[in-house]
Image: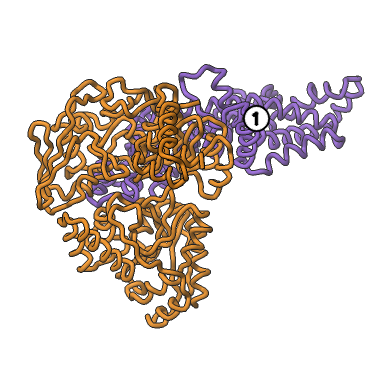
Chain colours: A purple, B orange
Amino acid sequence: MSPAIKLIAQRIALGLLLLFLVSILIFVGTLILPGDVAQSILGQSATPEALANLRRDLGLNDPAFTRYINWLTGIFHGDLGTALTSGQDIATAIGSRMSNTLFLAFWAAVISVPLAILLGLTAVRYKDRWPDKLISAVTLASISVPEFMIGYIIMYFIGVKLRWFPSVAMINDSMSLGEKLSAVAMPVMVLTLVVLAHMMRMTRAAILNVMQSPYIETAELKGLNSFMVIFRHAFPNSVAPIVNVVMLNMAYLVVGVVVIEVVFTYPGMGQYLVDHVSKRDVPVVQACGLIFAAVYIVLNMVADIVSILSNPRLRHPK
Amino acid sequence: MNDKLNYYASRVIAGMMSRREFMGRAAALGVTATAATGLMTSKARAEGPKQGGTIRVGLSGGGSTDSLDPALAANQTSAIVQRMWGEPLVDLSNDGLEMRLAESITSSPDAKTWTFKIREGVEFSNGKPLTAEDVMATMERHSGEESKSGALGIMRGIKSMKTEGMNFIVELDQANADLPYLMGDYHLVIQPDGGKDDPTAAIGTGSYILKDHEMGVRFVFEKNPNRWDSGRGFADTVEIIVINDDTARVAALQSGQVDMIGRVPPRTASLVARAPNITVNSKSGPGHYVFIMHCDTAPFDNNDVRMALKYGINRQEMVDKVLFGYGSVGNDTPINASYPLYTEFTQREYDPDKAAFHFKKSGYDGPILLRTSDNSFPGAPDASALFQQSLAQAGIKLEIKREPNDGYWSEVWNAKPFCTSYWGGRPVQDQMFSTAYLSTADWNDTRFKNEKFDQLLFAARGELDEAKRKQMYADMGMILRDEGGLILPMFNDFIDGVSDRVAGYAETPGYELMDYLAPVKMWVVG
């Protein structure tokens, strides 16, 4: 067996083990949350009878270990359970929310990843000259401003003043792709600004690192123009760290956009999770937690596998 | 002046002001009777309700955890959604009650037996005719032992219910002259067979039919072709969008994505009102923000400590700085002018000397611990800091403990001896008092136990003479004000934002957005 395949198998096994440990962590975490589910569902205006009735209906009287085992076996059968508060099937509800989140993350990634890499390459090409400094200054400024602030600024100028795009990014199934894209335009802009700097700086640093190597000098001596040198010779050798940071940011686009979803009223996973955390709807919180953890673990695993495969010594063992 | 007259005229047309009152007000503005009548007629022609179009509403409070079951409604979005498709027996109106599904209400002289005559010829949106049995089934579902209904407290005093033809008859344990008002509670919308088959079916007698919905996100309604009252429900389609973020909600109104919003944040209300196409309507309501002390826990078991704290709060400053003027000062009783039988008391003012006097007299000299959180009411931590400052001038040390929003209602409120909280208020005194100030009340969050107060409360329930009842409520208010564990610095206004694309807004008693009926009672003009 080639060392690459062995390494990849190890990574996948490690990922699964991690996911299992995370499931325990999530379950224990939700147990020690303060407050009582029934009280949170019924709010301030709950009578003691109503509380007792609800607690019994929700099965909150079973021991924790039994509930964990039931939950875990359910997940292996693809059953995430039903929401305590609304009685809906969690898998169906999450399905539509998840597809919204992925829709937003997809378009944000489609724009931000190529843009970040292109800007990174450009920054290297004009290192320490004004384009490099301008790119760094703008992207660092945009990552330093809190994202809700960028959201409000964009909403005020583009949504309220210019009225180019709707300020409420509400999408539903009856909309055409064009309408959906117009609805998510502003959140995509904000997300792009938020993730751009990290990926662009990493691309720049990783490429500059290999630019010192003798083979770059050779390429320059062959007479290639400097952009081709960077793109053909430097970039492939710095793919591993770039993919790492790209994956990290993609994971962020999926699991970390709660604030943007709230600001633009986007019906995604983050909003859904927050609603259920505040109502102590434990099964939903657990399911969301597990899915978010899985997204992180899978994307990081992909990053690892890409860097393994991009290493010629592992692909072609002696 | 013209604007004022136009406004009055539109109120008459919307049925919110009598013609007689209009003429009087017009005369006060120096307009002759003929001119005033002429103006009103042309106004009616020009501004009568228009059919058609779409009204879009931006609301807060909704979440994906909500249910369509009216019994479980506990926020602004749920309440407005169910008032779109469903109706209770009565609605609040400017002169008492408007009969809806009840055609008339009569009671026995002792106010223990109530007969509601149910309107004939009304159909549910599924085509089934409305019967008295449906009404009874609805009340049963909200009152059963198993019920999780928000209206359970209201239903508890009912001994038995029965139907006779189209009459729905309620027998009470104890006399209650307010029962008709209580039947207007927004949870008690009448469902076919009481919603026992499917409480979340959203089938009712309202002006609209729920077409499409995603909880906590969006609700689409279409006009109910079968509605019994053509005086409501003008727009063809109503779309309700949940926008919980304050800034986003205001931006949606400003950018024309929605035509009306609830809960304009007081901080920015005056800025929003500057936009030419937006009107900000604020209205005083029964809702109030409170600091509550447990009367049975030291040091608050000493009435002098309670009095010291009541004198040590600067109410006007709180209204100005926490509510930004969108509210009115409180007087340590939960009743204000929005209640039917209200009596005004002398306003308790900020008086550091009296506060110091009472504090000294109490014999307690340690610090006072106040717990607060962001969600106990908007601006609660700021209000607590103001309280701390005003008490410091009286030489009283207030320590503030910030609690997390999570679990505040189960761990702090009604559990810890001194904390910040809010009440949405109730339509009538009896309900407010018996919810929170009766010795045996579930939510007696001030642990206030006063025999005389309880006796008055029970006596007032059976008193049909309004003058006597009014006096009883005044006495009870006084007891609460001088002995209660409640520090009530301010009543918060409801602040709605409405764009000029819709018309028909009028002041109503009850809750915000025309007692939750703005989408049903307003129409599209632009």
- Per the image, label 1 sits on a secondary structure element best described as loop
| Residue in view at x 19 percent, y 22 percent | B128
Q: Position of residue B467 (x, y in %)?
A: 22, 59
Q: Residue at x 28, y 68 (%)?
A: B479
Judge by depth and name the residue closer to the eye, B60 or B364: B60
Vertical placement of residue B346 versus B245, above or below: below
Camera-side residue of B225 and B21: B21
Q: Chain of mark 1?
A: A
Q: Read off the residue under disc 1.
A: A162
For this view, does B146 lie left or right of residue A166? left
Category of crowding for the residue at label 1, using alpha-carbon neighbours closer than 10 angstroms: few (below 14), some (14–19), many (at least 20): few
The relative height of residue A226 versus residue A25 in the rendered view (above or below) is: above
- As drawn, which residue projects farthest toward the left? B164
Q: Estimate the x, y position of residue B36 in percent, counting from the top left.
A: 43, 37
Q: Quadrant of residue B449?
A: bottom left
Does any portion of residue B228 appear in the rendered image? yes
Coordinates of residue B262 in the picture (x, y in percent): 45, 40
Residue B258 in the image: state x and y as whole percent: 50, 31
How many numbered discs?
A: 1
Picture layout, residue B456 above or below residue B212: below
User: Can residue A3 be seen in this snapshot?
Assistant: no
Amino acid at dot 1: Leu
